[in-house]
Amino acid sequence: MKKYVVDASVILTEVLDSRKELSDSIKKYLISAEKGKIELYSSEFLKMEVANGIRFNEKDISKARKILRISLKLPIKFILLDPAIYEESLSISFKLGTTVYDTSYHILAKAQNATFLTCDEEYYKKAKSLGDIELIR
């Protein structure tokens, strides 16, 4: 079964972005995961990063809470990162000039023999040479 690791940009784009073409692309992955055709993974940190993204993009607290509840119910399996992932993420982030946050999702994907899905074009441009990454746009 095909496996993917998603970052916060994918989830925030799905729950906050009004660009239909992006949302449709992401929905295909979510529906496939719900049907058991693919597996979606992420790190536990995704929950906090999504909550923070919602906080700074939604002005209404009740709407923000609703969006967060929806995002936490998405068909994503969460993985705790081990020390080796942190160390590799730090090293690669220095090499690429990226954040450890973004890089950790990518390194997790590689460790899981999965493809990293992101909507972060800036990260994608810097990291595509590592492979195992797909830009959703």
Image: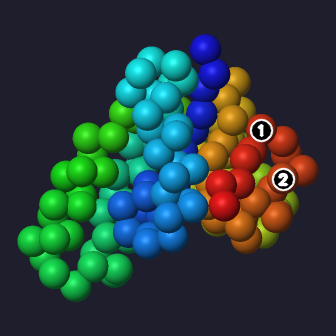
Colouring rule applied to residues: rainbow
In this rendering, does residue 27 appear at all? yes
Q: CA distance from mark 2 to mark 1?
A: 8 Å
Q: Residues within 10 Å of mark 1 (few under 14, many from 20)?
A: some
Is 71 located above or below residue 123 in the figure?
Answer: above
The answer to whether the residues at label 2 and label 1 have Cβ atoms under 8 Å apart is no
Residue topped by disc 2: 128
Q: Quadrant of residue 123?
A: bottom right
Q: How many marks?
A: 2
| Residue 67 placement (x, y as % from top left) | 24, 61
Is 86 located above or below residue 115 in the figure?
Answer: below
- Camera-side residue: 38 or 48? 38
User: In which quadrant of the rendered image does the C terminus lie?
Assistant: bottom right
- Camera-side residue: 59 or 84? 59
Question: In the image, what residue occupies the spot 49% across and 57% down?
Answer: 23
Residue topped by disc 1: 132
| Residue 43 placement (x, y as % from top left) | 46, 41
Q: Give the left or right position of residue 35, taking residue 119 as reference.
A: left
Question: In the image, what residue occupies the spot 84% across and 53% down?
Answer: 128
Question: In the image, what residue occupies the spot 19% across and 52% down?
Answer: 69
Amino acid on which disc 2 is placed: Lys
Is 52 located above or below residue 40 in the figure?
Answer: below
Q: Give the left or right position of residue 117, taking residue 17 as reference.
A: right
Residue lying farthest to the right in this orientation? 129
Amino acid on which disc 1 is placed: Asp
| Residue 91 placement (x, y as % from top left) | 75, 52
The circle drawn on residue 91 is none
Is 99 located above or below residue 116 in the figure?
Answer: below
